[in-house]
Amino acid sequence: MTAKLSSLERSERRLGIALLAPAFALLAGVVLYPIYNLIRMSFSENKLTEPWLAKPWIGFENYAKAMGDERLWEATWHTLLYVIVTVPGAVALGLGLALLANQPFRVKWPVRLGLLLPWALPLVFAGLIFRWFFEYQQGLVNNALIWIGLSPVNWLTQEGPAFFAICVAIIWKTSSFAALVLLAGLQTIPKSLYEAAEVDGASKWQQFWEITLPMLKPAIIVALIFRTITAIQTFDIPKAMTDGGPGNATETLAMYIHKTTIDSLDFGYGSTLAVLMFIASAILTSIYLRHTRRDPSAGRH
Amino acid sequence: MKKRTFLSLSASLALGLAMSVSTASISVAQTTLRIFTGGQQRPDVMRKIADDYEKRTPGVKIEVEVGGATSEQQQQYLNTVLASKDSALDVILIDVIRPAQWAAAQWAEPLDAFLGADKDKIMARYLPAYREANIVGGKVIALPYFADAQFLYYRKDLLEKHGVQPPKTWAELQAGAEKVMKAEGNPNLSGFQTAGAPIEGTVCTYLVPMWGAGGALTNAQGQLALNTAEARRPFQLWADMKAANVTPPNLAEIPTDRIRQNFQAGNLLFAMNWGYVWQRTQNDADSQIKDKVGVVPLPGFTADKAATCIGGWQLAISAFSKNKKAAFDFAMYLSSPEVAKAQAIAASHLPVFPEVYTDPDVLKANPWFAQALPVVQTARSRPVSPAYPRVSEVIRTNMNAFLAGAKTADAALADMTRDLSQVIR
């Protein structure tokens, strides 16, 4: 009896492995191998523009260079600023949008469409649209400023205004994703809680602080994590709006890697930068993950 | 009735069979070549030339793929195509600054074997600057397609109205612009524009005044020489123009073709731009300045010492093409005096053959070509280096930061020296 079962189990396990194998093979091919190759390349001098160098192994030379590379630290700092500003910004705006979309509207689709459209738009599209908004001569923003009697601003060619304009674009583009996650969270909160609060005489504001926010916490954390991961990789929108300008004042890590690898064809140093960025984002994500794992038990007390 | 149906059926069958046979025989002989060109290099004119070629060369079909508007947008795309050894492109239009890099990366098929014994004779037909630009390490890397240089475009009508002569020096240009702008009082009229966005053209915005001042990026030994007074002159020049409001406050976001658009819309007095602008201002339906345009060589700090950047586009055969011979034949056709003349008339593209400049039909379409030949002959090359993309990035990024006011001249020059010294030793 037991022998029979275990043979069944064994064949099931074999079937399971056989069914998983293609997925594993695919992952190994498109994820593990490229990562292995990236790490290997990061220890070599691999310049496509100078093929006669023959890609020698140079150990930690690229990493040593990176540590003293001012532009890398600047790009890291810019990326961090984008994370600090646009992650809470997008989640806060997303929360507002989600609360709005959760209202009992008679016609729901215009709100839903408004929520989905920025999310469905390709990033570089959003970047180009906002580039036109903030353009000096023909931009809508400067038009509006002139219309109310102010002088036009050089949005995209000054460090502060360019950073501001890019943040506005990123928050607009990414808040709808946060809103979708939060809207799903909102809809899982039982109506009975609000009814009970109503009976007890709690104001709308109290209901929001005491019921909505605590019940929404897991969804908010999911939104924050996803937003942080994409914010670390910020590339498309600043690429389309300023291409890192003026100078390198709005350049992010991902843009610096792209410029090194694709424009200058320095695959060795570009790989080193990519490995460093990978390590940084892995650390940040693991901090978040640890926090969420601890969180539900803390919430139950 | 029955018989007729059968007849018509068999007839249509036979016809169908014949048709399928004939299409099969065509598809055997058919070679499809794909040529890559830029959005700013008049793909419409290229299409017309390709149509002519298809007509005279049965069995060859040409597809024209249009890339980005700027040189580095095109190169970014090509980097990924060529690094992956993609065979989709056969003939590729490349900027005059690229052959050294393309040779080093082995992306371009050397053309010596195709040119054969006639190599020297064929190459001798071109203007010397283009012959030299396309021969790297003794090998022919690409064939010249059209020449280019930067010129000063001006509004003939406005200069005449206010009694200003076309400037020969930067000081004259600034004074003339200030005079006309003040008298016109049009808030949309900008005095002078050159490329300021972080793009390839902005490299020339730095190099042209430096050359004009007698400087160079490297000294006679090929070492970086940015510690000279001449290396500072461009910063001073553009700072003065900005302070006098001759250049617009958003110069740092202006790429090459935006200058042309502003000029063509009637909002610009002096434009530093390439040869293609003339034809657009004269023939575009939306041009506000038809017959109101003059072209002269760029000014210098002194009238006798002006400089300009050499430009122009070359035809490279992809090393990964599957139809290299057919691609070479097409490139040879494109790089002929006949096509040079057609391009000159249709797109005001400057010819790479000296004799085409004096062709009466060409001069009728482009009266300023008479003055253009000496400019093209003396125009200077941007630094030749396989690492040119990096050189370009350092110069344009720092120039852009300076024009935007994000870096002082000292900081921009110091950063430029630091980063270039890693590439040019």
Image (cartoon, rainbow, N blue to C red):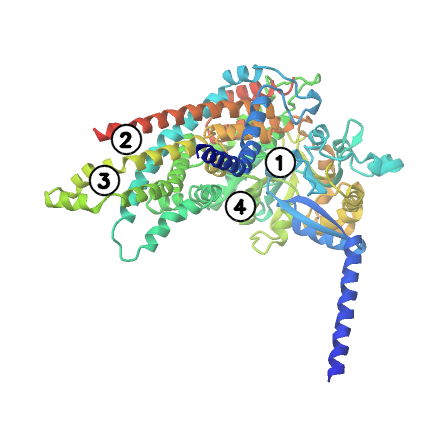
Q: Chain of mark 4?
A: B
Q: Nearer the viewer, mark 3 or mark 2?
A: 2
Q: Position of residue B344 (x, y in %)?
A: 72, 48
Name which residue type carries label 3.
Thr
Spatial CA span between label 3 and label 2: 16 Å
Please indicate, yes or no, whether residue B213 appears anywhere in the rendered image: yes
Q: Position of residue A184 (x, y in %)?
A: 32, 44
Labels 2, 4: one chain: no
Q: Chain of mark 3?
A: A
Q: Which residue is mark 4?
A: B262
Spatial CA span between label 3 and label 4: 54 Å
Q: Which mark is residue A30?
A: none
In this picture, is B314 found above or below A285?
A: below
Please indicate, yes or no, whether residue B364 appears anywhere in the rendered image: no
Q: Which mark is residue B80?
A: 1
Q: Chain of mark 1?
A: B
Along the viewing direction, whichever of B172 and B145 lies nearer the viewer: B145
Q: Secondary structure at mark 4?
A: helix
Q: Which mark is residue A296?
A: 2
Spatial CA span between label 2 and label 4: 60 Å
Q: Which residue is mark 3?
A: A212
Name the residue located 70 percent from the left edge and 46 percent from the top edge.
B34
